[in-house]
Amino acid sequence: MKPEKIKVNRTLEGTIFELVFLVLLIAVWVFVIIALQKAPDVVPTHFDDLGRAASYDSKYSILFAAIFTSVAGVILLGSAYFPHTINIPVKIQTPRQYALAIRMIRVLSLVMLALTAVIAYTSLVAVSPSAVPILAVVGLMFAVIIVFCVLIFKAR
């Protein structure tokens, strides 16, 4: 049986998420551009298993990761309008479950912007770069997914 396509209308919550996302996206990219201007020509781009800088490259190589995570955030935010495409290990059947899945995707879009900022900070600004801030944001992503999956499961 094919999953039912749910139509998501614009809501106050969605509009607030989108406005916050837009403001944060602009702020993050202002930060990235300023950090790029002030960064040395060669910056850490990869970290070893202990979280220490292990590989260095041009400061502009950080743009790939920053652009990728920003675009991923935009895609996540847009996918909130297509909840039938959300793939999680919990079967979504009720309107409450759909609402929680949509909220999860919107929260993840904001966390993706945080990842953009942390990647730029770690490689371009940090005095003693470490992978810990990046891993903390990735851990936050997993925590958001786990918490919302539990909430969605309980909302049956």
Image: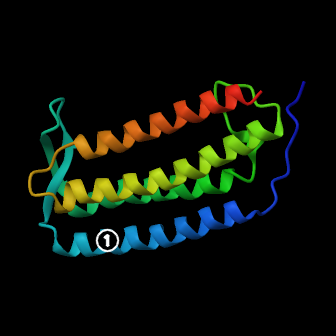
Taking 99 as reference, is 28 left or right? left
Q: Position of residue 147 (x, y in %)?
A: 54, 33
* Furthest-left residue in this view: 128
Q: Residue at x 36, y 44 (%)?
A: 137
Which quarter of the rendering shows the C terminus? Answer: top right
Residue bearing mark 1: 31
Q: Position of residue 125 (x, y in %)?
A: 18, 62
Position of residue 7 relative to residue 52, above or below, is: below
Which quarter of the rendering shows the N terminus? Answer: top right
Number of callouts: 1
Q: Amino acid at mark 1?
A: Phe
Taking 125 as reference, is 63 left or right? right
The image quadrant of residue 2 is: top right
Position of residue 93 relative to residue 15, above or below, is: above
Q: Residue at x 9, y 51 (%)?
A: 128
Circle 1 crowding by C-alpha within 10 Å: few under 14, some 14–19, many from 20 = some
The local secondary structure at tag 1 comes to helix
Q: Nearer the viewer, residue 134 or 43?
A: 134
Q: Residue at x 30, y 45 (%)?
A: 134
Q: Position of residue 94 (x, y in %)?
A: 82, 34
